[in-house]
Image (cartoon, grey):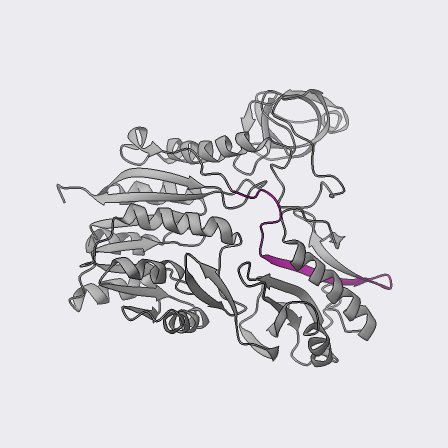
């Protein structure tokens, strides 16, 4: 289908059939699928075509002709263009249904063995739907004589200055605002991506919900930033801030964080409590954004493992040791595997912090270390993996299928890559149940826990 200029200029009327994986409304125009952010199933909307692609169309919502009964008011005084609120206009019970449907749709798309019989449970709701995010990561910009600190509008470099983010912790937002005032007061240099000037690029504020401690990190372009140590001393005077760090990156790095982090003031880590265990967190350490739901996520995952006191548990992608340390009470030994050196250091510190004597953490790739453990005679009775959104590497899946732990739980933040990985894993394993936990209300993201059991014929 070739689209004319008139198709882009005129308003079109679309009936929304369902939601896409990113929470956008899906309909059809001239027999071609169209994605319209902000539209809901069963709504009739007026839209404009923004961009066409070989397989789909990008649309923009103009107005709603027939409203869904499941539509709720978008948060007051919040910029609707801000990211991370893809489902804030949808009633919460329907958000939970949507997140279960994402898992089911992913299974139907990739159809791993026996997927029609998988027991996919209803999504476990969050206790708090707002102000649950414990880490704020705001970008800094200096333009037209004014310092801006905030978040980029989706798919753009347009910075929304100090937005009201209703899912973000009130304390981290307050601290970000105060830091901006200090930057203006002391005239700190701000990184300029257009001219490649050195300066502060990003400000990260992480809060430990259980202790109230806050950790601030300035991500900078360039090492020597005039006035940064003075700024750190002033930031340390803010309520609950116990440490300030600098993370150094460069313009060639596509990631937000660089590889080098140094402490400017205060403690080495902040401490968070999860399920009666303490976890010290350094700036680059991965930790779930919703501490309250993290307790539910890890409790459910450990429950599905059915651990016994004589087992050895392998905790892959172990991060700072959260899952393994919590599970250490139920097994003979825990061995964690993590590729990031700083995370391994944090994990070993957390082992000591919790007086755990049956857990150790190894630095390296899971696909290399797992067979080494097996070959050295370590009994791999149970395995838990919590990989990034990209899922498991095929080489690791092959390793798991060779090692064949009896009990296996896969925590996934991306149902699509989970379903893809299950295609291979289901050659050896049966999927008993998939549980969904809502870690990030108002977003299209969900966290799924799959319990896999080694098939008897293997």
Residue drawn at 41 percent across, 60 percent down: 276
Q: Quadrant of the C terminus?
A: top left
Residue drawn at 69 percent across, 35 percent down: 74
Span highlighted in magenta in the image = 127-147
In-image side of 97 versus 162 (left or right): left
Q: Position of residue 259 (x, y in %)?
A: 53, 72
Q: Position of residue 331 (x, y in %)?
A: 24, 59
Residue nearest the observer in this picture, 277 or 138: 277
In this orientation, does residue 250 appear? no
Q: Position of residue 247 (x, y in %)?
A: 60, 72
Residue drawn at 58 percent across, 52 percent down: 133
Quarter occupied by residue 232: bottom right
Residue drawn at 41 percent across, 32 percent down: 104
In the displayed image of the protein, which residue is found farthest to the left?
457
Q: How many marks?
A: 0
In-image side of 44 versus 125 (left or right): right
Q: Quadrant of the N terminus?
A: top right
Reply yes or no: does residue 139 show up in magenta: yes
Q: Is residue 355 above or below residue 34?
A: below
Reply yes or no: does residue 162 show up in magenta: no
Residue nearest the observer in this picture, 301 or 445: 301
Q: Position of residue 321 (x, y in %)?
A: 39, 64
Q: Is residue 349 above or below residue 60?
A: below
In this orientation, does residue 439 appear? yes
Q: Is residue 366 above or below residue 230?
A: above
In-image side of 36 versus 208 (left or right): right
């Amino acid at each position: 289908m070739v689209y004319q200029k008139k198709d882009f200029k005129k308003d079109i009327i679309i009936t929304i059939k369902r939601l896409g994986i990113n929470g956008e409304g899906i309909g059809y125009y001239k027999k071609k699928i169209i994605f319209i952010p902000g539209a809901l199933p069963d709504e009739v909307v007026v839209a404009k075509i923004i961009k066409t692609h070989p397989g789909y169309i990008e649309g923009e919502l103009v107005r709603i002709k027939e409203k869904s009964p499941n539509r709720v008011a978008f948060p007051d005084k919040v910029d609707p263009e801000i990211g991370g609120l893809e489902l804030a206009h949808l009633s919460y019970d329907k958000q939970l249904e949507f997140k279960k449907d994402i898992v089911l749709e992913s299974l139907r798309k990739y159809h791993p063995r026996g997927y029609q019989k998988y027991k996919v449970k209803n999504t476990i709701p969050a206790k708090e739907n707002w102000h649950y995010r414990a880490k704020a990561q705001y970008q800094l910009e200096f333009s037209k004589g004014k310092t801006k600190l905030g978040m980029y509008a989706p798919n753009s470099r347009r910075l929304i200055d100090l937005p009201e983010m209703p899912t973000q912790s009130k304390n981290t937002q307050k601290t970000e605002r105060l830091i901006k005032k200090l930057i203006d007061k002391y005239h700190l240099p701000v990184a300029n991506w257009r001219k490649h000037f050195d300066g502060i690029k990003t400000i990260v504020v992480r809060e430990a919900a259980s202790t109230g401690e806050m950790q601030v990190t300035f991500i900078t372009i360039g090492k020597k930033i005039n006035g940064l140590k003075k700024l750190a001393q002033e930031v340390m005077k803010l309520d609950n801030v116990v440490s300030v760090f600098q993370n150094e990156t460069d313009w060639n790095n596509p990631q937000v964080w660089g590889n080098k982090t140094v402490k400017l003031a205060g403690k080495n880590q902040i401490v968070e409590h999860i399920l009666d265990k303490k976890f010290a967190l350094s700036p680059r350490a991965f930790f779930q954004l919703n501490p309250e739901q993290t307790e539910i996520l890890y409790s459910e995952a450990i429950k599905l493992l059915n651990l016994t006191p004589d087992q050895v548990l392998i905790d892959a992608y172990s991060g700072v040791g959260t899952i393994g340390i919590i599970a250490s009470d139920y097994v003979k030994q825990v061995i964690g595997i993590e590729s990031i050196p700083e995370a391994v250091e944090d994990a070993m510190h957390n082992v000591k912090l919790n007086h755990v004597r049956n857990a150790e953490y190894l630095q390296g790739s899971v696909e290399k270390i797992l067979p080494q453990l097996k070959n050295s005679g370590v009994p791999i009775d149970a395995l838990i993996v919590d990989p990034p959104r990209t899922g498991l590497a095929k080489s690791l899946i092959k390793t798991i299928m060779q090692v064949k732990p009896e009990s296996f739980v896969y925590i996934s933040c991306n149902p699509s890559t989970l379903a893809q990985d299950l295609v291979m894993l289901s050659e050896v394993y049966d999927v008993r149940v998939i549980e969904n936990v809502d870690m990030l209300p108002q977003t299209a993201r969900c966290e799924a826990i799959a319990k896999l059991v080694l098939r008897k014929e293997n």
